[in-house]
Image: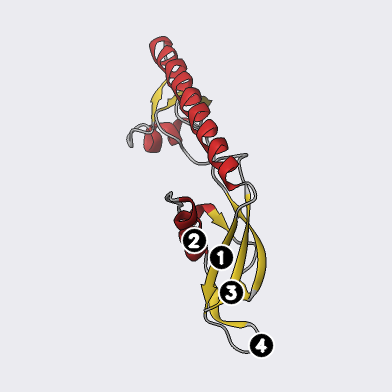
Amino acid sequence: MKIVLRDDVENLGAKGDLVEVADGYARNYLVPRGLAITANRGVVKQAEAMRRNRDARDRRLREGAQELAARFAGLTVEVEARAGEAGKLFGSVTNAEVAEAIGAQLAIEVDKRTVELAEPIKELGEYEVVVRLHSGVTPAVKVVVVAR
């Protein structure tokens, strides 16, 4: 059965996509929950408008993310943490603490879910942290962990 997605559905498609799914999946799950509508000529035209709007919104978000990434270029953020004599931290530095430090330095709000730590930070030193602003826009930020 051909349907048009009214909302993003994981592992299926994005809003406005015309997709082919099993009849039962469409009738029993997607359509009753308002996630999709059966495809006909008028709905397909509506789907094209949804896709154009989605593409325009995505383009605006990407441009905003690229401007923000330019501000992240060469950024060094200092995070204070309690540490022992050997440089081992009591606990670890979390992505929330890194996001808070970046936000404080740039005077913007950074969501902790966008900060990706390769591994938990458990020692003093310098680390490279990736901030995922948008798909394809992931600037790296240098984080320096110092003793409190």
Closest to the camera, between mark 1 and mark 4, is: 1
- The answer to whether residue 73 is above or below residue 22 is below
Disc marking residue 78: 1
Where does residue 119 sit, x and y in percent of width and height?
64, 67
Where does residue 104 sit, x and y in percent of width and height?
45, 57
The residue that label 3 is drawn on is: 146
The residue that label 4 is drawn on is: 86
Q: Residue at x 54, y 44 (%)?
A: 133
Question: In this image, 46 relative to 81: left or right?
Answer: left
Q: Are marks 3 and 1 in contact (CB under 8 Å)?
A: yes
- The answer to whether residue 138 is above or below residue 102 is above
Q: Nearer the viewer, residue 26 or 115?
A: 115
Closest to the camera, between mark 4 and mark 3, is: 3
Q: Are marks 3 and 2 in contact (CB under 8 Å)?
A: no
- The answer to whether residue 133 is above or below residue 105 is above
Q: Nearer the viewer, residue 41 or 90?
A: 90
The residue that label 2 is drawn on is: 101
User: What type is the residue that disc 4 sits on?
Assistant: Ala
Q: Residue at x 57, y 36 (%)?
A: 66
**The image quarter in which residue 11 lies:** top right
